Image: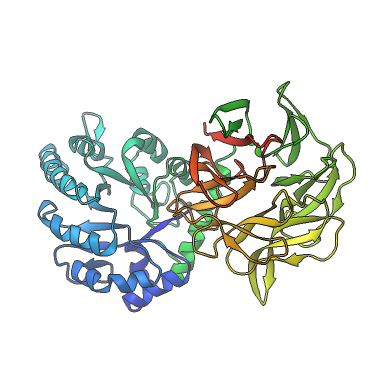
Amino acid sequence: MKFGIQLYGPLNNMKGDLLENLRALAAAGISEIEPCVAIDPMPGQEKIIWPVSWLLEHGEEIKAMGLEIKSAHVFAADLAGSVDTVKALAKKLGLRQVAAQMPAPLTEVSLHHGALVYTKAAEELRDAGIALLLHNGEGNCRTKFGGQTAYEKMLDLCMGKVFAQVDVGWVQFDGEDPAEFLHRNAYRVKSIHYKDFLAGSGEPVDVPIGAGAVDVAACFSLAQAREIPQLIDQEHFGGDVPHELMDICKKLNGLTYHSRANTVSYLNTYDIETGEIKTLARFDRVIEAPNWLKKRDVILFNSDGHMYSFDIKTGTETVLDTGICNRCNNDHVVSPDENFIAVSHADSDAGYASRVYIVPMGGGEARLVTPNSPSYLHGWSPDGKELAYCAFREVNGKLEVDVYAIPAEGGEERRLTAGGFNDGPEYSPDGKYIWYNSTKSGLMQVWRMDRDGGNPVQMTKNHRNNWFGHVSPDGEKVAYLSYGPEQLEPQEHLPNMPVELWLMDANGGNQQKILSLFGGQGSLNVNSWAGDSKHFAFVTYELP
């Protein structure tokens, strides 16, 4: 998941030159920032609230560091009278939205006056493609008018022209439940700020995000499901600000899987000729990665570490005997003769400890194929002789993620890719090519290479993150999963997100979106085409 960094707190805790601090943030892996910008002079605050002139002067330099500025927090005495300045800033930097503070004091008169001013500014900014957001601060949700918070009343008075940038820390401190507040205002929340305060304190004592009173997991779940941009707004740091910020991002991304605890899954099929969608079954748990057998109307999938078969005609599921492999993930394939299944099994609690095993389809002893870990299986060659998988390996002292191949009987693994993050390898039906996805060109795209790793060709080139190109049995079509570029980092493929299914010809032509759905990780990880090359299976999800 992509997170922006609201710069007020971090810059206030960093020493040194401003540009030097920004370079340190970029070097740590941060890619998006939301600065505070002063329309009117604010002497002494230039390090954390930048004058417009300074940002215009250094905007290109900041972008050259790899830092995007899509949003800015604007401080202006006369917002409506500052629209032209904001437009110029947006044009220079590529801003898509600006946030402004609530008017003060919090009286019905000030709110009505503020609403008139903000609505006028919002309409003029909208014509330039810029959204105006209202940011809440201390007391904005504690002060009530007729039982309604001042913040929500102000948004109502703006008649849908101004959107919400919700700071969940201040919502919590003001006595409201942040998750409930976000649900209540979900239709107008366009940005979420994560800030946290010490629980039970009468004063706003800043603490690291997740260490205070805010139910961060509940807020994150809603933001992820609705594709709401999320910003780290922390003001408490121990010392190494850039790396502490990246640790927060990692912790928040870890909540992706926490939010799956009560997920409902649906097993579906898609007809590429008619566009017909059929929902075969509902499951009160997470199921993932359907493999549709080519010789039978049976679909295999993983769930809770086990492999299951689902009989399409009877609608019944059966757990498969996979021996010691009871921690199977969503990377598994079936042998060409359908007598065996190869699974990726975590045989250790230590991090990403996935190894590839082969198990008889009817049950029996599991045979280890890849001693090295982690290895995530995606392809079994049509001649049955070879497996292709994604592997994390240390190469020249650096961790690289590449496509590897290994004999199905076991032996030495061969590295087939180099450069970028490479995943999802799958053999073409004629065995000549391996399809895979890679970030070599920037965003994640679908690629094809010769079976020996030669002649890599980029097959998709749109401005999206495309994953898992699955070739139909007749070799004519390729189905793949697609994320929007703003949703996550190119190397990520997370669950419980609005995503798309795309279809293209095997030569890369006729690329088209065929379906929007709520899913992602688990929806289409492995080849799920039926033997007729007209249908494929996929999984969608629903949050409680």
Residue 266 visible at all: no
On screen, residue 293 above or below 460: above
On screen, residue 454 above or below 129: below
Of 126 and 274, the residue lying toward us = 274
Task: Provide residue 83's location: percent of width, then percent of height.
Answer: 14, 55
In the displayed orientation, state which residue is furthest to the top: 314
Of 31 and 42, the residue lying toward us = 31
Tell whether 148 sits left or right of 103: right
The image quarter containing residue 182 is: top left
The image quarter containing residue 417 is: bottom right
Residue 357 visible at all: yes
Task: Provide residue 142's location: percent of width, then percent of height.
Answer: 27, 40
Task: Provide residue 510's location: percent of width, then percent of height.
Answer: 50, 46
Question: At x 37% / y 46%, what residue is drawn?
Answer: 168
Question: At x 59% / y 31%, what residue is drawn?
Answer: 271
Tell whether 322 sits left or right of 199: right
Task: Provide residue 293's location: percent of width, then percent of height.
Answer: 75, 36
Of 59 and 189, the residue lying toward us = 59
In the displayed orientation, state which residue is furthest to the right: 365
Tell whether 460 sits left or right of 367: left
Of 332 and 425, the residue lying toward us = 425
